[in-house]
Amino acid sequence: MKKIYCSFILFLVLLVPVFQVSAEMDIEPDLNCKAAVLLDADTGTVIFSKNSDLEIPPASMTKLMTLHLIYNDIARGVLSKTQIITIGRDADFRSLPPHSSLMFLEKGQRVSVMDLMRGLAVPSGNDAAIALAKAAAGSVSAFVRLMNKEAERLGLKSIHFDDASGLSSKNRVTARNFAAFCAYYIHKHPEAMKELHSLKTFTYPKKTNIPPGGTSAYGPITQRNRNNLIGVYSWADGLKTGYIDESGYNIAVTAQKNGRRLVAVLMGGPGKNAGEGSFIRAVDAVNLLSYGFYRFTDYTVNPGKLKPVPVYGGKENWLSVVSPPIKKITIPRELTDEISISLDIPHPVMAPVSEKGEVGKLLISIRGKTVASYPVTAGKSIEKGSLLKQFVDHVRLLLARPDRCRKVGS
C-alpha cells in the first residue's frame, strides 16, 4: 500500500510543473542539479543551459555509448539481435561490486544480444555491460578504446570513458556534449526508444537462459525501469539514469510531443538516499522538459519566391536568385510574429554571372538579430553585355547606390 501511495504522490508532483510552466512562460526553471542542458533534437538548438561545460562522471549514462556501439555492430552484421552469448565468470553478477545495478547474469547462462541490451537499458545491468563489451571487442578494455575513439570521431572533446558501465569515477562528460551525443544516438537508432528505453519493466532469467541441469540463484526477477519518468510523464520515452557517489543523480531523458522531440541532460542532482535523489531528479527533468515544450516552438520560415536582383554590365538587367531549403528554427512562442527575412547582397552583381554562383545571403532575424543565414545563388548564367551596355550600366550603378539589404518576396 505504501508503494502505491508513493507512486501516486510522484505522479501528482510530476504533473504540477507542467501547468506552472504553461502559466509563467517567461520564467526559466530553477533546477536542483549542478549542470543541465535542454536541446531541441530536430534543430540542435540549446534551449536551456546551466553549467553545461562542467565535467561530471556520467555514471550509468555511460551505457548509452555502449548501446550505440552495439547497435553499430548490429547494423554492420558483426552482431545480431538474436545472437546467443554465453556468459563468462567476469560478467556473473557475483563478480560485480556490492550494490551494483544488475541484470543478474550467471556464468554459463545463454542470453541473446537483444536481452543483454534490454538488461543494460532498463535495470541498468553492469553485468550486461561487461557481457556486451566482451562480445563486441573481446575484452572490456578493447571496447573502452572503441568508445573513446567514437567520441573523438563525433567531435565530443569533453567526453572520456574508463569503463563500459559507468561505475568508474574516471568517466567524464559535460552536459553539453552528452546532450549532443544523445540527440545523435536517437537520430541514428530511433528503434531504441521502442525496443529498449521506453520499456517499463524487464524480467530475467527465462527458462531458455539457464543451461540444461543448471539453476538460477534467484529465479526470474522483474525490475522496473530506473528512469522513473517512463509511464508517468506521458511524453517521455527514454533514455538513461545514472548515479555514483562522485557524480550525484544524473539523467539523460528524451520526450516527444506532437512530433517534436526534446533531449535533456541533468547532472549532479542532490539526494540523501536513492529514493530522494531519484525523486528530485525526476522533478527537475519534468520542469525542464515542460519548459521546453510550452515556452518554445519549432518554426518553419517560408521566404516565398525571392525577388530578382539587378545585374550590371550584362545582357540582361535582372537575375533570378534561389536559396536552399530553409530549416526549422526553435524560438520562444511569443517571438513568432517578430521574424523578418531579408536578402543581403553585399556587392552589386556584375556580369558575367555563373549559374549557381553565390551572390548573397538570405538573413532570418528576430528583433533585428540574425539567427540564421543561407547562401543565395544565381538562378541562371548571364553573359557580359556590349561595351555600350557596360558603360551605361556603370553610370546607372553610380546613380543607383543600391541598398545592401532588400525585402524578400515577389
Image (cartoon, rainbow, N blue to C red):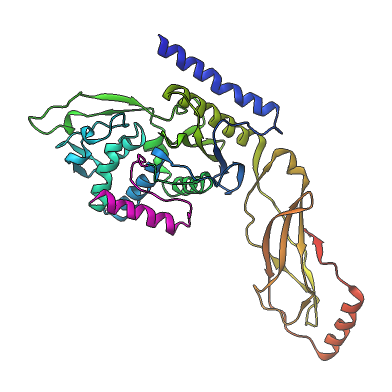
- Residue 314 highlighted magenta (yes or no): no
Quadrant of the drawing holding the N terminus: top left
Residue 205 found in image quarter: top left
Name the image quarter holding residue 81: top left
Q: Position of residue 118 (x, y in %)?
A: 32, 36
Start and end of the magenta stretch? 139-168
Q: Position of residue 131 (x, y in %)?
A: 24, 42
- Give coordinates of residue 272: x percent, y percent: 46, 23
Is-magenta flag for residue 166? Answer: yes
Q: Is residue 305 left or right of residue 65?
A: right
| Residue at figure coordinates x 44%, y 42% from the top left | 57
Task: Give the quarter of the figure containing the C terminus.
Answer: bottom right
Q: Residue furthest top?
A: 1
Position of residue 284 in the picture relative to residue 6 (left or right): right
Is 92 drawn above or below residue 364 in the view shown? above
Left/right placement of residue 232 relative to residue 84 reads right
Asked if residue 190 can be seen in this view, the reply is yes
Front residue of 54 and 228: 54
Q: Residue 320: x and y, percent?
A: 73, 69
Outermost residue toward the bottom in this view: 387
Q: Is residue 389 above or below residue 56?
A: below
Q: Is residue 203 above or below residue 166?
A: above
For residue 342, side relative to residue 402 (left or right): left
